[in-house]
Image (cartoon, rainbow, N blue to C red):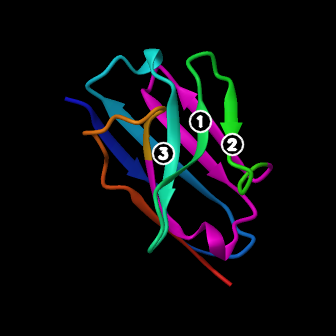
């Protein structure tokens, strides 16, 4: 069974930075494209960053130039470096495969950006 454990969230002022981590088990990590998703209150979950098995990356327009996704296959971990954070980045952040597994989601990590 796939397990996803996100960490690294917190409360930060606008303009600040956070680095999220997600440990993945129960699957052959290096064979999966991975993504970071977020869900703000009252909104649908959205994919904000993705990284392929070949380390190519793609970003939502709202985070392009501010967020960087990376992966460490040896550690079975995917990261999201978030810089120049804005209040509109406030959400619960989740990692998952891209496209996501339907039945496997972690608990997420809360990111709150104050203005």
Q: Earlier in the sequence, mark 2 or mark 3?
A: 3
Give x and y (percent) for residue 10: 49, 68
Q: Residue furthest left?
A: 1
Give x and y (percent) for residue 98: 48, 32
Can residue 67 be found in the magenta stretch?
A: yes
> Quarter holding the C terminus?
bottom right
In the drawing, what numbered circle is on residue 21?
3
Left or right: 102 in relation to 53: left
Mark 2 near mark 3, Cβ–Cβ under 8 Å?
Answer: no
Q: Which residue is mark 1?
A: 50
Left or right: 115 in relation to 111: right
Residue 58, compared with residue 74, is above or below; it is: below
Residue 103, compared with residue 43, is above or below; it is: above
Residue 95, compared with residue 97, is above or below; it is: below
Q: Secondary structure at mark 2?
A: strand
Q: Secondary structure at mark 3?
A: strand
Mark 1 near mark 2, Cβ–Cβ under 8 Å?
Answer: yes
Most foreground residue, 44 or 115: 44
> Quarter holding the N terminus?
top left
Q: Secondary structure at mark 1?
A: strand
In the drawing, what numbered circle is on residue 59?
2
Q: Earlier in the sequence, mark 1 or mark 3?
A: 3
Q: CA distance from mark 1 to mark 2?
A: 7 Å
Q: Which residues are magenta?
A: 65-94
Label 1 or label 3, whichever lies nearer to me, is: 1
Most foreground residue, 9 or 54: 54
Can residue 76 be found in the magenta stretch?
A: yes
Label 2 or label 3, whichever lies nearer to me, is: 2
**Label 1: how many residues lie within 10 Å, few (<14), some (14-19) or many (20+)?**
many
Give x and y (percent) for residue 72: 53, 26
């Amino acid at each position: 069974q796939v397990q996803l454990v996100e960490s690294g969230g917190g409360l930060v002022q606008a303009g600040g930075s956070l680095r999220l981590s997600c440990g993945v088990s129960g699957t052959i990590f290096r064979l999966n494209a991975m993504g970071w998703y977020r869900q703000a209150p009252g909104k649908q979950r959205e994919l904000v960053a993705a990284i392929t098995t070949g380390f190519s990356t793609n970003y939502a327009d709202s985070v392009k130039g501010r967020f960087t996704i990376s992966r460490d296959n040896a550690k079975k971990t995917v990261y999201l470096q978030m810089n120049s954070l804005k209040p509109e980045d406030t959400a619960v952040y989740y990692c998952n495969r891209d496209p996501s597994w339907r039945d496997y989601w972690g608990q997420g990590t809360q990111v709150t950006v104050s203005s």
